[in-house]
Amino acid sequence: MPSITDVLRRTSWCWLPLALAAAPARAVEWADLPEPQRELLAPYAEQWSTLDEARQRRLALGAERWLDMTPEQRRTFRDRFQRWQDLSPEERGRLLERLRQYRELSPEQRRRIRDNFERFKALPPERRQELRQRFQRLPPAERARALQRLRERPRRGGPR
C-alpha cells in the first residue's frame, strides 16, 4: 500500500479543478502552511520554494482536503487511485474522453444522468446484474439504438 505522501505526490492533479477555483493569487509559503499540512507535505519541504505557484497551491489544497477526510473517505480515495493506476493507457484515455463528454453536457443532461444512476443503484442487486447482462448481450448496433431511444424518451411527469 503506498504511503499518503506517495499518493499525494502522484495524485495532486485530482484536486486541480477545485484548487484553481479556490486558489489564492500568490504562492503558498512553507511557513504559512498549518503544521498538519507541513507534516503531510514533508517530502516537498526542501524543494517547496522551487515548485511553481500552481503546484504549491494544488499540494496545499490537497493536503487540506486529505486532513479533512474521514478514514473511510481516505480508504475510498486510495482505492480509486489504485484502480486508476491499474488501468491501461487505452482505458485511461477512454475514461478521460468520457469525462470530457460528460463535462460538455448541459446541467439538465447531467442531472438526468445522475437521477437515472440513482434509480439504477436503488434496484436490488440481482435486478441490476440482470439488466447489465441483458445490455451486454445486445449487439453493438442494437446497444447504440437502445441508448439513443433512452436519450429521446420523454420523461415521466413532464420536464423537470
Image (cartoon, rainbow, N blue to C red):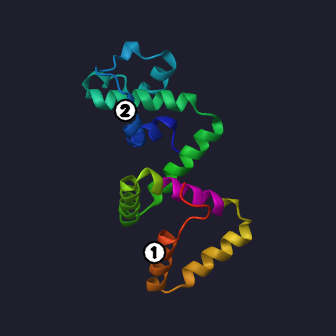
Residue found at x 37% / y 22%: 45
Q: Secondary structure at mark 1?
A: helix
Report which quarter residue 28 is drawn in.
top left
Q: Nearer the viewer, residue 93 or 45?
A: 93
Q: Residues within 10 Å of mark 1 (few under 14, many from 20)?
A: few
Residue found at x 38% / y 39%: 17
Residue 18 pos. (x, y %): 41, 35
* Residue 66 covered by magenta stretch: no
Q: Secondary structure at mark 2?
A: helix
Give amino acid for label 1: Gln
Q: Nearer the viewer, residue 120 or 8?
A: 120
Give amino acid for label 2: Ala
Residue 148 — which label?
1
Residue tagged by mark 2?
21
* Residue 112 covered by magenta stretch: yes
Q: Earlier in the sequence, mark 2 or mark 1?
A: 2
Magenta-colored span: 110-120
- Between the C-alphas of marks 2 and 1, the distance is 35 Å
Residue found at x 46% / y 35%: 5
- State the residue lying farthest toward the front: 158
Residue 4 pos. (x, y %): 51, 36
Q: Nearer the viewer, residue 131 or 155?
A: 155
